[in-house]
Image: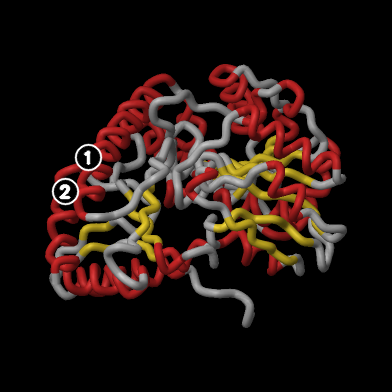
Amino acid sequence: MADIQPFHVMELLRRARELEAQGRDIIHMEVGEPDFPTPQPIVDAACRFVASGAVHYTPALGLPALREAIARFYHERFGAAVAAERIIVTPGASGALMLALAAATDPGDEWLLPDPGYPSNRHLVRSVEGRARALPVNVAQRYQPTPEQVAAAWQPATRGLMVATPGNPTGTVLDAGELAALHAVSHARGGILLVDEIYQGLTYGLPATTVLAQPALAEADDLFVVNSFSKYFGMTGWRLGWLVVPQRWTREIEKLAQHFFIAASTPAQHAALAAFEPATVDILESRRAEFAARRDVLLPALHELGFGIASEPQGAFYIYADIGTLAADSATLARRLIEEAGVATTPGLDFGEHLPRRHLRLAYTTRSERLLEACARMRTVLAG
């Protein structure tokens, strides 16, 4: 437990809630939770199911109808052939990550993780007696690892590589060629490539895709893919995700799921059946357009304030900004912004050890006028 650090953004959220309870107006740019409600077709489906009263366990691998719906989603939207038997429904993407790492990691195994990256990954590796080793990634490489970097870092104890596309906190995207090249490096060394696609669908100026759309990778026996209903589908509080595994791993994952979770939430699974309906997708696509508009409002406003953004986000809903010309330490700046300006942001220390003091993550998960108000408030602090 001494190795497990707190999730700092959640502590910032707690402080924001305390200030709101005191009557302060806080603009939330810290957590990855959009201000949109769950799409109504999903809510309606949940209400109909719960009203039946037949709320029982599902199989540990998930509701068969939902696994089949996810498989159709891959085929219809991305042209990817993914058998429903390879899809495991989980309590959030966090549950999917837990299952994949627990199944694939022996004590002492090492996973390579881009730094900056999602903070929980390294702690999940540690919790299953593995070791997380950071790969420092810079703006020049769009905050994504290169095949050459991974090959140079690979050691006898290395079990695999974890990547995210679109990434958190940077919003950068790996294209098909880059993913194939990273898989080739891990495959040649007998390792595993784990791809986090939880922001799939939230891309701007380029189409959404999946690593599984590549025929050469769709059937790879050393590729795991994590996804979620939280981000694009707007179901954060429902805590539902999924994991795509090679066929030979299904039974091992099932055993772990039985012990870890019994099953994912039954009401959430029945609700998610409506997530792929055309009426729901129309809502989700209008929200994606709104996220793009918010990004296009916030980027120039931050540039004007002096934030450095050399790699603009292509996906997700975050901007990872360099504050080197504005303050000496992003954690100190984040505290000042929330206390003095009522603007909640996330300092770089949550995302790793590579230049965390120089960076701040800002989420454009609230409406544009609030984002501009946040910039106006930040201006008063930065000028002080």
Instruction: State which quarter of the image contains the C terminus.
Output: bottom left
Instruction: State which quarter of the image contains the N terminus.
Output: bottom right
In the image: residue 166, left or right of residue 12: right
Name the amino acid type tagged 1.
Val
Which residue lies under the disc numbered 2? 372
Q: Residue at x 52, y 37 (%)?
A: 173
In the image: residue 28, left or right of residue 261: left
Q: Which image quadrant is residue 46 in?
A: top left
Q: Secondary structure at mark 1?
A: helix
- Image location of residue 165, percent across then percent down: 55, 40
Name the amino acid type tagged 2.
Leu
Q: Secondary structure at mark 2?
A: helix
- Image location of residue 182, percent across then percent down: 71, 39
- Image location of residue 261, percent across then percent down: 66, 57
Q: Give 267 or 238, whichever is nearer the viewer.
A: 238
Q: Which mark is residue 297?
A: 1
127 w.r.t. 88: above or below: below
Residue reaching furthest to the bottom: 2
